[in-house]
Amino acid sequence: MNARGTPYDRLANLDYDALQSPLPVDSREHVLLKFWMSQTTLVMALMLTGAMAAVALFLCWLSFASRFAAHAQSWKGVVPPFVAVPATLFGLLMTFLSQDVWDANRSAYRAIAMEREQLATLAALSGNHGDSADDIPRAVRDYVETAVGLEWKTMEDGKEAPETEAALNRLTRAVASARIEAAFQRALVDTVMRLRSAREQRLAIAAAFPDDRKWAAVLIIAFITQIAIAVVHLDRPRPQLLAQAIFALAAIVPISLVASVDEPYSPPNAVSSEPLAQLLERYPQK
């Protein structure tokens, strides 16, 4: 048993509520972009199809039917390889963005797996100490309930749940104040610290995505590519519209699929909290 005044006692007496600070969260000022990314994959694809079709039809009208058509025709003669410049930039930006998104999703799943592993370890280590560690299972259950019931919802906006932070602080105090063998207590404290690290990683991922600037760059370059296609197809409207349709189809598929998983903890394709919820079966009801 640890004597009064040990590092674990000082850890138990820390004021965690005073130490906690809010995570930096993006303001997400691009309302239209956020609205678009909150839709299902199919709806996102349809909305993007409508936007690109509108741009293609406007450029075709501007090139052949508007009062500026004669002026637009004076630009005839731009060689077709010119389209490769914005199209290549679009492809590179889309590649980098999709890599970021896939990495974020893998990290999101790893964070939950680590969080679940540490909670399961707490269950195993504290289960054989009777009343000496009786507060730990209750504290773990409180943490899981608030994480699953509250924090998964707040993470949709890139924020943490104060109730989950408070539950984690209570768990830390319960572990630090448990009167058990020093070796077991040291293992429990290390496990709680790793649990904190896993949660912080999960919250950091939720706060960092989506990156509006990267998505704005991809969409703007896509529309610039449409302009380039129109510029090199000033001879006849039908070939211009066909080229626009081919590029639009090639762009809509990857953009919509990547955008649908850009926010790992937000609907409609959110990472499930079920791995944590399953742990509630290991702990008694309050």
Image (cartoon, rainbow, N blue to C red):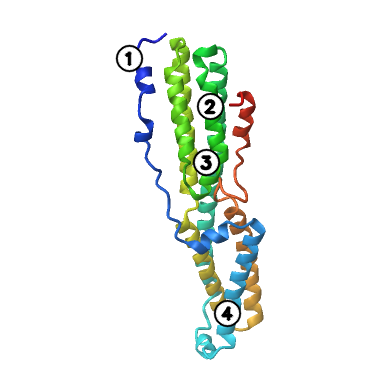
Q: Label 1 to label 4, Cα distance in Å?
A: 75 Å
Question: Can you give x and y, in whole percent of width and height, for residue 264 in the image?
Answer: 56, 46
Residue identified by numbered label 2: 140
Quick one: 52 or 116, which is closer to the camera?
Answer: 116
Q: Residue at x 55, y 32 (%)?
A: 144
Residue identified by numbered label 4: 58
Q: Amino acid at mark 3?
A: Glu
Q: Which mark is residue 92?
A: none
Q: Earlier in the sequence, mark 1 or mark 4?
A: 1
Q: Earlier in the sequence, mark 4 or mark 3?
A: 4
Q: Label 2 to label 3, Cα distance in Å?
A: 15 Å
Q: Which mark is residue 151?
A: 3
Q: Earlier in the sequence, mark 1 or mark 3?
A: 1
- Neighbor class of circle 1 (other Cα within 10 Å; few <14, some 14-19, many 20+) is few
Residue 60 versus residue 243 in the image, above or below: below
Can residue 89 be spotted in the picture? no
Q: Amino acid at mark 4?
A: Phe
Q: Which mark is residue 5?
A: 1
Question: Can you give x and y, in whole percent of width and height, for residue 211 in the image?
Answer: 47, 54
Q: Is residue 18 left or right of residue 75?
A: left
Can residue 54 be spotted in the picture? yes
Q: Are circles 2 and 1 on residues that touch, CB within 8 Å? A: no
Q: Earlier in the sequence, mark 2 or mark 1?
A: 1
Q: Residue at x 57, y 49 (%)?
A: 266
Quick one: 249 or 35, which is closer to the camera?
Answer: 35
**Image-quadrant location for residue 57:** bottom right
- Neighbor class of circle 3 (other Cα within 10 Å; few <14, some 14-19, many 20+) is many
Q: Amino acid at mark 1?
A: Gly
